[in-house]
Amino acid sequence: MSVLIDNGMVKAKVVDISWERIFVTIRVRLEEMEKLQGREKLVFYGVDTLTGLAQIYFKVVGQEENLYTLQLNITNNGENKCVPFGCYSLLVCRGQDVLAECQFDLMLIPRLLELSRGFLYASQKNVYTVTFVVDEDLEGLPFRMHVLDSSYTGGKFPGNPKVSGYFKPIKFVKKYLLGHKVVIRRIYKFYSLLYQKKADRTVLFMTEQNNKIASNLEAVSERMIERGLDKDYQILFSARTAAAEPQGIKSWIHLMKLLAKSNHVFIDDHAPVLDWLKLREETEVVQLWHAGAGFKSSGYSRWGHFGCPRPQSCHRQYKYGIAGSKNIAPFFSEVWGMNDEQVLPTGMPRMDEYLDEAHKNAKIEELRKQYPASVGKKVILFAPTYRGRNKKTAYYPYELLDFDRLYEVCGEEYIVFFKGHPWVNNKLSIKKAHRDKFFDLQTYPNINDLFYIVDLLITDYSSNIFEYSLMRKPMLFFAFDKVEYSLSRGFHRDYDESAPGKVCETFDEMIEAIAKKDFEYEKVEQYIEHHFDYIDSGASDRVIDWILLGKMPEEIKAEIAAVEERNRRMHQLDFTELYHIGEEESDDDSEEEK
C-alpha cells in the first residue's frame, strides 16, 4: 500500500455515529476531494492499530456529494465473525493508495461515551464492548474504535484450589465419560478419521428440536427420493429433542457417527450441539430455517439480549441459508451473522405442498367435514405467538380478550378458530354459550392447512403471516404489548411499517376494525411483492439443484465469489509501518544491549 496521508490530498472527518441494534452507522465527510484523479471507488477499512492488520470492511450504504455513510454489523465483520478484539482506526483507501485516516469531528468528542455500547451474552455473564475513544498520545483527534470481549469478574483475589479429600469414581465417570463435551468431540474426531474418505455424497437431515423430521427437512428429503437421488446419495436422518431434554451416551455416539459420515448437513432450526462441536471444514452445513420472515428478533439480531448466541455458535458453521426472496435475505443474514450473499432466495421447501392445488382442494374438503360450522360462514383465525422466555414458560394472556364482545361482533357472518403457538402451555377456556362460534384448534397439526378456509387472520408478531399472505386475504395485528415486546424480544424491522395489515394496540381497536372491515388490505399485496421471488412448488428442487447438484445461478455464484475475493484482498493489506508496530520493541532491545 502507498500511504499518501502526509501529502494532505484528502482530509476525512467522522461527523456522526449512530446505532440500530447491532449495526453502527458512521458518517464521514471528505474534504479536498477535487485533488483526486480517476474514478475508482473509495474503500473504507477498519485497521487494528495494535497489529496493523485490516479486519473490517465498512459497507458504503449512502453517498451525498462528499458525505459517505458507512455501516458495520458488529457481529459480522464481512467474514461471518464478530469484529475481533482490537483498537481500530478508519482508513480511506483507493486501489493501492491510503488517502486519509479519519479524524473525529470536534463536536462528537463530548458524545463518545454515550455512543459506546456493551452487549451482554452467555446468560449476561460476558460482555462484548464497542467503545469510541480519543488517543491522547497522538496529535489531532484520530478515530479510534476499541473492541473488547470480556467475561465476568468479581474483583476478588483468586482463591486457593480446594482439596476434595477423596476421589469419587462414579461422579467422574458420569461427568467425563457419559456426556462431557470434550469426550463427545473426541468421539466425533474418531469417527471423522474413520469415515473421512466415505463421506462424499452423503446428506444428513438433522433436527435437535423435534423427535421427527418435518417442515423443510421433510420436503427436501422426500423430493430427493422422488427424483431418485437416493441412488446417488446416501440419505441419513437424525431427529432428537436434545435442545430441551438430556440425551444418553448411545444417542450422542449415534449422532457423532452420522455427522462424521456426512459431507452435507441440513438443519431447519438452531442445533445447540453445533454451538460447541466444530465440524470438519469439508462438511457443508445448510440452514433451511423453518419460519418465513416475521418480526421477532432471534440469533445475532438479539445480540445483547437474554438468550442471544455467543460469538462462536452454531450459526457460524453455515455455508448457506435460504429465504423467500433476495429482498429479505438481510433479515436472515442478520440472525445468522453471515453475509447477505450466502442467503439463497430459493423459497421455502415446506410451501411446495402448501401451494399444490390438489393438496389445497383435498384439505378444504377435509376441513369442511371436520368443522361443519365453517360451511357458509367466514372464518377468523386467532393465531398469536407466545409470551415468555422459552418452551417451559410459554403462555398467551387470553384474559385480555373480551370473549362476549368478540362473540357479538361475529354475528351471523363469522366463526373463530383459536390456535396459539405450539409452545403455549395455558389452556384456552371457551364458555358453553360460545361453542357454536368459537373453536379451540390448539392441537391441529398444521396451521398452513387452516389458511385455505380462513378469511381473516388475527396475529401479532408471528411469522405465520408469510404463508398466509399468499392466500391474498386480509390480516389484523393485535399488538397490545408492542413496546414491551420490542424492548424484551426485539424487532429486526419497523413493526408498524412492515405489518401487512392494520395494527391494533387495544382490544377495542381490533373489534372496531372487524366490525368496519378496516383491514388495510393493500399492504398484503405490497408484502407479497417484496417477500417472494417465486410463487410455485419448486423450492425443494431449487435447494437440491443449487446446493447439492452445483447448479446455482451464475449471478449468485458471482456475488459470493466477489465477497470472497474482497476478503482475500483485505487480508493481504499490511499497515504495520503506518502504525510503527515493532519499532518500540526494537528500541528497547537496543537500550538493553547498551
Image (cartoon, grey):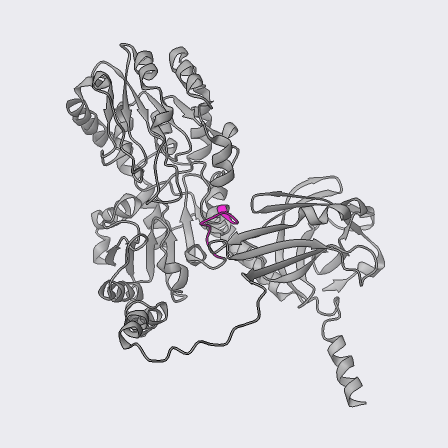
Residue at horizontal 23 percent and vertical 50 percent from the top: 211
Tell me residue 352's x, y (percent). Answer: 29, 38
The magenta span reads 302-310
Tell me residue 183's x, y (percent). Answer: 33, 72
Residue at horizontal 46 percent and vertical 42 percent from the top: 297
Residue 153 lies left or right of residue 226; in this view the side is: right
Q: How many marks?
A: 0
Tell me residue 591's x, y (percent). Answer: 80, 85
When the figure is inspected, residue 575 is found, relative to residue 61, above or below; the finding is below
Tell me residue 358's x, y (percent). Answer: 21, 30
Q: Nearer the viewer, residue 93 or 369?
A: 369
Residue 101 appears anywhere in the view: yes
Q: Residue furthest bottom?
A: 594
When the figure is inspected, residue 171 is found, relative to residue 215, above or below; the finding is below
Q: Nearer the viewer, residue 216 or 201?
A: 216
Residue 75 appears anywhere in the view: no
Which secondary structure type mostly characterizes the magenta part of the structure? loop
Q: Residue furthest left?
A: 369
| Residue 313 is covered by the magenta coloring | no
Quadrant location, the N terminus: bottom right
- Hey, which quadrant is residue 62 in on the image? top right
Residue at horizontal 27 percent and vertical 64 percent from the top: 252
Residue 571 lies left or right of residue 352; in this view the side is: right
Q: Residue furthest front?
A: 165
Quadrant location, the C terminus: bottom right
